[in-house]
Image (cartoon, coloured by chain):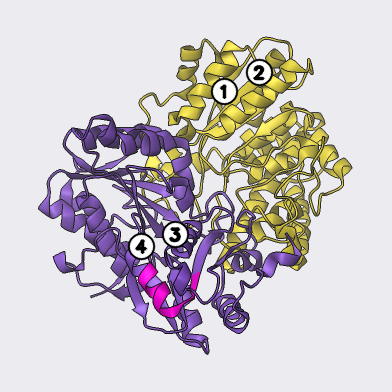
Amino acid sequence: MSVTNATDENVTVQRRLELAESPLARLQRMIEIRLVEDRIQDLFAQGLIPGTTHTSQGQEAVAVALGAATRPTDIVCCTYRGHGVALSLGILPESVLGEVLGRQIGCMGGLGGSMHLSDPAIGLLPTFAIVGAGVPVAVGAALQFATLKNDGVAVSVFGDGSTNIGGFHEGLNLAAVWNLPAVFLCENNLYGEYSPIATTTAVTDIALRATSYGMVADTVDGQDVDAMYESIRNAVDRARGGGGPTLIEAKTYRYAGHSRSDKAPYRPDGELDAWMKRDPIDFYATKLAANGELDGRTLDEIRDEQRSFVDDAAAAAVASPSGSIAQMFAHVLAPSGH
Amino acid sequence: MRMRMNQAITRAIADEMEQDPRVVVFGEDVAVAEGPFKTSEGLLTTFGPDRVRDTPISETGFLGAAVGAAMTGLRPVTEIMFIEFLGVAFDQVVTEAALMHYLSAGRFNVPMVVRASAGSGLGFGCQHSQTLERWMLGTPGLKLAVASGARTAYGLTRAAIRDNNPVVLLEPRALYGEREDVEPGEASIIELGTSESLRDGTDVTVVALGQTVHVALAAEAAASWSGEVIDLRSLMPWDKEAIVASAKRTGRLVIVEENQFTGGWGTEIASFVSSAAFGDMKAPVVRVTAPDVPVPFGQELEKRFLPSPEYVVQQVDELLATNSAPAPWWKEFA
């Protein structure tokens, strides 16, 4: 696939591989994701971003564990709440911020926007803006791996809200009946758009649904990046080894509302504070510091480095021009032939 | 009474709910949160949880439920947050709802409304910015109307709820916050299938729909030509009589559409009028549309996608000067 401004593949792949190798890199990436999404909210407040955006502050551990536990050659189908996953898988902050701003530096040249992030070099299909749409698509990617006897794995990332739509059930059943190398990773953040999960979902422990498809399930603390890594790694290894699909339920929380305009008035008092006390970044930083894994630096120093990295990325994104008219017409149909 | 389009829609639903206990409302976040676009503000408080319900994100589930409820005695008003979301539940609208009256030899009616926000202009990207009238066009058993502001939204919503057929009602998302004068009441109900002439003119008939009504009006106001600007309002059925009569009067027809050129709603109008008024036309029918591309995200490109008033003026100028159809702006790209 050719994209107007694709980043050097080596850079994104290298960013991905760092996560598998280094706990410190995982902490840095979680901080990076938080800072990029905070920056997106700032840019919105400045009136620089059209439309809407869906941020995932509080869910960084799930995204980073996914990047660490999978290979760049695996396939990931994610939702419109995908900045964290895109960054974790290796896309650079300037490509994410640029896309959100609609600029040429964006990973889709500014034609996609916040809800449509992608980079084939690290296996991220364009993120899905229709709830549940990515689940059966991931099944198809897994089918490809099985058919071509490749040892790749396809991961579908979705929210609890997606589990009430037909595509979810049809996708999980298909993956189970065909014993495909797929992992279904549910970020249960307790809200589907503006609705608390219990008002829309009869069984609020999503992992229980795996029983309906004869599928292995795991329920994980989504705020603990190590626990998430362990769970995803097990599921991915099982899939790669021919053991079939797994449904993972990450118990997590989104600090922001559903989208830009949502102030989340539906949340009970104190709920957000309680979850912020279990912040995945603070939790992991404390753990690494205690284990002496901060590479001789203080947490503040690490945060400052990431802030400076994201500042530079934001400056590059803001300075990038808008897409040209010709780009509107560039990729409507694939070239003829094969 | 001055009101925003989302307030006019809420008022129309409330007025019908007041009069008819069979009218119920459901959709995603329409009850407690009062609608993602605030098109159901106060309905839960006024009419209670039996009649105003939040659904899961389950379009097939709740549209199918609307079909069943409508066939057996309720009059459901459902909300599809973005018209694209209808895609996951299309069966229930075009294959179930639309055909139940026919399949029961007229013994069952399906009096349900599918309201959906539609259109470009707000930076929602290509999966949340289309109008998609053409998905429904040509489906027997279905009615389809498009609001162009608070006043038509009020009138069409009430008519849709009263209709004994399934009606899809599209609401241009960019207009929810725009204010117009609305006089709530029976007299403001707009019969489905009727159009409205908004500006008299002699040189050309300009037919528009939804968001492009404002584009056409702005173009006419700025132009040197005199155009009869007509808000089509309904697509199934559409007001053949009024459009053909106007085209015969002016001898020229320009259709301003938000959708892409290929297969856009204007193809039906253009085809019909070309046949019905052929002898009276001074020039070919012209469709002013978006290019055959997805709706781009970046602000400048998205603005370019929707026909602008300046572009409409330029196209009509050229039509009047040459009596032949002008090339579209994107001819160099596609």
Disc 1 from disc 3: Cα separation: 56 Å
Residue A151, placed above or below residue A260 = above
Residue identifier under label 3: B272
Q: What's the chain of the residue with tag 2?
A: A
Q: Is residue A223 visible?
A: no
Disc 3 from disc 2: Cα separation: 59 Å
Residue A264, placed above or below residue B156 = above
- Magenta stretch bounds: B244-254
Could you say which chain is coloured purple in the image? B
Q: Which of marks 4 and 2 is in front?
A: 4
Residue identifier under label 1: A248
Name which of mark 4 and mark 3 comes first in the sequence. Answer: 4
Q: What's the chain of the residue with tag 3?
A: B
Check if mark 4's residue and mark 2's residue have beta carbons within 8 Å: no
- Most foreground residue, B168 or B98: B98
Give the class, few, some or many, for how many residues have Cα within 10 Å of label 4's Cα (few <14, many ≥20).
some
Secondary structure of residue under mark 1: strand
Number of numbered discs overlaid on the protein picture: 4
Residue identifier under label 2: A235
Check if mark 4's residue and mark 3's residue have beta carbons within 8 Å: yes
